[in-house]
Amino acid sequence: MIKRLCIIGVGLIGGSLARSLRQAGGVAEVVGSSRRAENLERAVSLGVIDRFDTDPAQAVKGADMVLVAVPLGSMESVFRAMAPGLSAEAVVTDAGSAKGSVIAAARSALGGALANLVPGHPIAGTEQSGVEASFAELFQRRRVILTPIAETRRAATKRVRAMWEQTGAEVVEMDAAHHDEILAATSHLPHVLAYSLVDALARMEDRVEIFRYAAGGFRDFTRIASSEPTMWHDICLANRSAILDVLARFQEDLDKLTVAIRDGDGAFIQEVFRRAKDARDRFTKTEDGVVPAE
Amino acid sequence: MIKRLCIIGVGLIGGSLARSLRQAGGVAEVVGSSRRAENLERAVSLGVIDRFDTDPAQAVKGADMVLVAVPLGSMESVFRAMAPGLSAEAVVTDAGSAKGSVIAAARSALGGALANLVPGHPIAGTEQSGVEASFAELFQRRRVILTPIAETRRAATKRVRAMWEQTGAEVVEMDAAHHDEILAATSHLPHVLAYSLVDALARMEDRVEIFRYAAGGFRDFTRIASSEPTMWHDICLANRSAILDVLARFQEDLDKLTVAIRDGDGAFIQEVFRRAKDARDRFTKTEDGVVPAE
């Protein structure tokens, strides 16, 4: 049981964690913090948090668990601002989509609190954002990846694991660099491609017509291009090297496929499409177990 | 009212048209044809068609409406095979996703029947295929594009339009080249990208792990990579030039975005993501009217 949970950044992820833990009876008090008081007032009126303080150092006072759920570009300044208020028992975790940059930010700004730092990433979400979009079931049957560092106390990791398990998530631990490679491939690259495609089409002359005749395949393919631009801008910069690696591999493959289309190399095209369909069909089947969402 | 509808290629599209027209009382008899008798027997037992003939020339005998719903690569041989059986009143339409190649195939193989040819494309479907996946509601609130040619009699176009309107679709007419450009952008390119991405990931060493942590964004983004490889192989070759045009534009934009990520050009990244989100959000809103599906 968490006595006082402090959530910095009360949006879709932070709000959903608070709702879920409250519903499960896993937390006694929830304190929120973020830059805008209006947002925090809404969170109070929605019953997501009990009270708030816009000053992170004040908000974390007396908290035994702190979740930092702000865009990656704001992690370091939030860590720095809250550090003076952290008690020795406070376990600190986060919800960033890239772990290497969060760890670097913490090393620079959290100082002595590294033993209680458990970097984490709930692989859950929708293209919606904000506390209004939060709901208690968001993490059910989703995966949460924890990437403890050398300094992290085992007891701290155990407490963060127990917290996420109460939301119905499956918790796994791995190396931060491995996490960043995997997420670059399965999440960050698809977002970059979807944004880039929609932007390319939106700038074509006949774009009204183009979107008018777009279909269900297009709708699903581009849904993630409705995601919050600042959040994804931050992810692109925070996980830059892993994203560039996987982008280069993808562009090499796309070039080969383009050449095959140009040359009418039907065998090559069939081979790529067949392999992709097989892999995608297998993915659908494995989803029957844990169904991960963005 | 269609007296005898002949469907060549009784799969998702052909089967759904038959089911829909039967339900609406828009057809008296449905005759099927395709290469495999097993498939046609299943279509009879499902109540989708009344009878069948594997010989297209026999199947079209006495039909006043013929729908050719075979992969684009088979259009010409089907046209050639059925031509001797067509009556002078038979209107011929098709369901191909690229119209230029269908028109070229018809000019080469349909001979005198061009006055009754109404090339068409119902923008509907799922990643499923086969007559088992067909259902009467597939075309409801979807768009059907007709691309009549110079030789097409106005009366033939009117009859095809009336047929599709009975299924609940909205019918529009446009030039074949314009159709092919629009579909290359909104449908063919997304399929090429989805296939290429899934194939690239599937060939990475840690692909088991990669797919294990894939999320909802990935699932939606790559759903179309489960589409039928032969059909999409045919589309890539049939609409090659329009697809290569839009691929080149996309690759140019993706290169610029890649450079921006490499150089940490946050303003450029934000601008692309913001423009894409605005366009995608507008698309979601316009969908409230006619909701097109792949």
Image: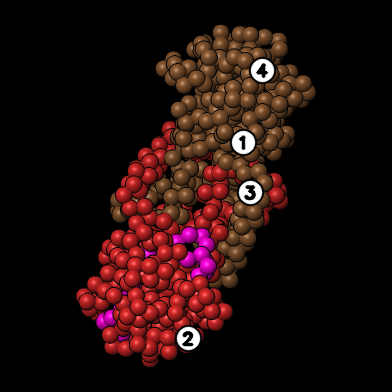
Chain colours: A brown, B red
Callout 1: 10 Å neighbours few (<14), some, many (20+)?
many
The earlier-in-sequence mark between 1 and 3 is: 1
Callout 4: 10 Å neighbours few (<14), some, many (20+)?
some
Q: Which residue is at a point 66% across and 43% down the rendered structure image?
A: A290
Q: Do callouts 3 and 4 mark residues in contact (Cβ within 8 Å)? A: no
Q: Are marks 2 and 4 on the same chain?
A: no
Does dot 2 land on a helix, a strand or a loop? loop
Where does label 3 land, which residue?
A: A287
Q: Do callouts 4 and 1 mark residues in contact (Cβ within 8 Å)? A: no
- Which image quadrant is residue A17 in? top right
Q: Is residue B240 a member of the stretch shown in magenta? A: no
Callout 3: 10 Å neighbours few (<14), some, many (20+)?
some
Q: Which residues are magenta?
A: B113-134
Q: Dot 2 falls on which chain? A: B
- Distance Cα–Cα, label 3 vs label 4: 31 Å
Between residue B288 and residue A207, name the one nearer to us. Answer: B288
| Residue B73 in view | no
- Which image quadrant is residue B123 in? bottom left
Where does label 1 land, which residue?
A: A140
Tell me which amino acid carries mark 4: Ile
Residue B237 in the image: state x and y as whole percent: 47, 70
Q: In the figure, is residue B72 to the left or right of A177?
A: left
Q: Do callouts 2 and 1 mark residues in contact (Cβ within 8 Å)? A: no
Residue B156 in the image: state x and y as whole percent: 25, 77
- Disc on res. B53: 2
The earlier-in-sequence mark between 3 and 4 is: 4
Is B267 above or below relative to B31? above
Callout 2: 10 Å neighbours few (<14), some, many (20+)?
some
- Distance Cα–Cα, label 2 vs label 4: 71 Å
- Distance Cα–Cα, label 3 vs label 2: 41 Å
Q: Dot 3 falls on which chain? A: A
| Residue B127 in view | yes
